[in-house]
Image (cartoon, grey):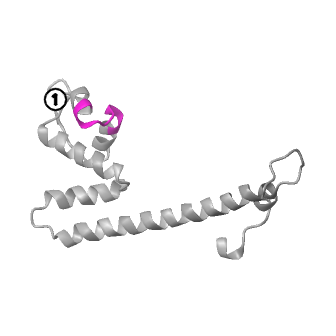
Amino acid sequence: MNIGDVASRSGLPAKTIRYYEDIGLIKPRRSDNGYRCFAETDLHKLAFLGRARALGFTIEDCRTLLALYEDESRASADVKQLAQEHLDKISIKIADLEAMRDTLSELVTCCAGDNRPDCPILRDLSQPPDAGDQ
């Protein structure tokens, strides 16, 4: 398969596939004229990487997951630990976003939104951060 074929079948842009090759996540064969020749195993790895990235795993996490996937003597505990650490990070981000939403929602509720210049949103944004926020 050429890069256009594998891009179409994997759902990844050709630019992403070239990047994954540049950083060593995939290693397609090269034909005599220098064109990339992708095998079904390359397509499978690309689909794997696309799914892992869609779940928010970093490139380094993907590198680790791919190595674990290819290691038939792996311990599933290693995979679970990596996924759990990622899940914990996601939970922290969600909590942070919920706190941001709550704060902004309160500010929007407090703002009259009329023609007066007084605006609690701008007043709050102009305050220095609390020592605990840093």
**The residue positioned farthest toward the bottom in the image shown:** 132
Identify the secondary structure beneath mark 1.
Answer: loop
Q: Is residue 69 above or below residue 28?
A: below
Q: Residue at x 43, y 63 (%)?
A: 90
- Name the residue furthest left: 72
Q: Is residue 112 left or right of residue 48?
A: right
Amino acid type indicated by mark 1: Met
- Quadrant in the rendering for residue 56: bottom left
How many marks overall? 1
Q: Nearer the viewer, residue 55 or 108?
A: 108
Image quarter of residue 50: top left
Disc 1: which residue? 1
Quadrant of the image containing the N terminus = top left
Magenta stretch, main secondary structure class: helix
Q: Position of residue 45 (x, y in %)?
A: 20, 46
The residue furthest right is 116
Q: Is residue 61 visible?
A: yes
Question: Magenta residues?
Answer: 8-16
User: Is 8 situated left or right of 42 in this image?
Assistant: right
**Is 9 included in the stretch rendered in magenta?**
yes
Q: Position of residue 76 (x, y in %)?
A: 18, 69
Q: Can you give x and y, in whole percent of width and height, for residue 73 in the image?
A: 10, 67
Depicted 34 relative to depicted 86: above or below: above
Residue at 13% across, 36% down: 39
Please state which of residues 109 and 78 is positioned toward the viewer in this rendering.
109
Q: Quadrant of the C terminus?
A: bottom right
Residue 116 or 79: which is nearer the viewer?
116
Q: Is residue 118 left or right of residue 45?
A: right
Is residue 24 among the parts visible in the rendering?
A: no
Q: Residues within 10 Å of mark 1 (few under 14, many from 20)?
A: some
